[in-house]
Amino acid sequence: MSAYRTLLAAAAAVVALSFPLAAEDLPEGIQIQDPYARAMGGMGKSGAVFFVIQNNTGTDDRLIDARTDVAKKVELHTHKDNGQGIMQMLHVPEGFAIASGESHALARGGDHVMLMGLTRDLAPGEVFPLTLVFERAGEIIVEVPLDNARKPPAMGAGMGNMGGTMGNGMGSAMPGQKTGG
């Protein structure tokens, strides 16, 4: 019987010790993962910022705005098929909802932060601050590296036919295609 109690106590200790590790894996709050930017055409041109938002809070939240001094104008954007097979970039003034315990990817060919009218040339590897504004979490400042060489993830089944012109000022190429810039 004492061996049984020892085994039970050991099992309880393992379970109790695993909780702090689980909490470490998913820290509380809004987490911004893997941010990076792409810029096209140098000063006065445009760029975009991509990252994953992880909502490890007890409430739903929403990314409602973004700001940086490297662009004259910053907007939350998405891509949408116009019904004729052409993808168009659209401003999303209501922002992006992130349910509690869920994540939301801002990725090439989808939702992203658009940088319009770059105020200066950005060098490869250069890091700049981006302030993300959340409805509940408030402002979070993220350090974003410029990485024009990063390849987009492989297009998944949910991407649909995205071979049309984007009309976004960043060239007409789709993820994985090259542009003239």
Image (tube, rainbow, N blue to C red):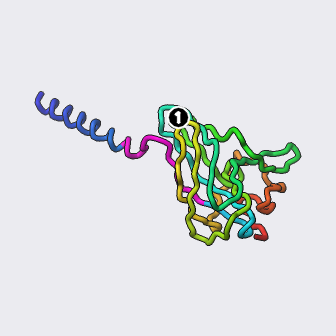
Q: Magenta segment, which residues?
A: 22-36
Q: Quadrant of residue 24?
A: top left
User: What's the residue at 52%, 44% (across, down)?
Assistant: 54
Front residue of 87/55: it is 55
Q: Secondary structure at mark 1?
A: loop
Front residue of 24/154: it is 24
Residue 154 percent coordinates (x, y): 65, 56
Q: Quadrant of residue 128?
A: bottom right
Q: Type of residue at label 1?
A: Ser
Up the image or down, 172 lies above or below 85; here it is: below
Give left or right: position of 12 versus 144: left
Up the image or down, 167 lies above or below 30; here it is: below
Residue closest to the far left: 2
Up the image or down, 147 lies above or below 133; here it is: below
Residue 33 percent coordinates (x, y): 52, 52
For the image, the number of numbered tags is: 1
69 inside magenta stretch: no
Q: Quadrant of residue 170?
A: bottom right
Label 1, residues with CA under 10 Å away: few <14, some 14-19, many ≥20: some
Give left or right: position of 141 versus 44: left
Residue beneath disc 1: 100
Up the image or down, 127 lies above or below 136; here it is: below
User: What's the residue at 85%, 48% (across, down)?
Assistant: 85
Residue 81 percent coordinates (x, y): 81, 45
User: What's the residue at 72%, 58% (across, down)?
Assistant: 175
Residue 4 percent coordinates (x, y): 16, 30
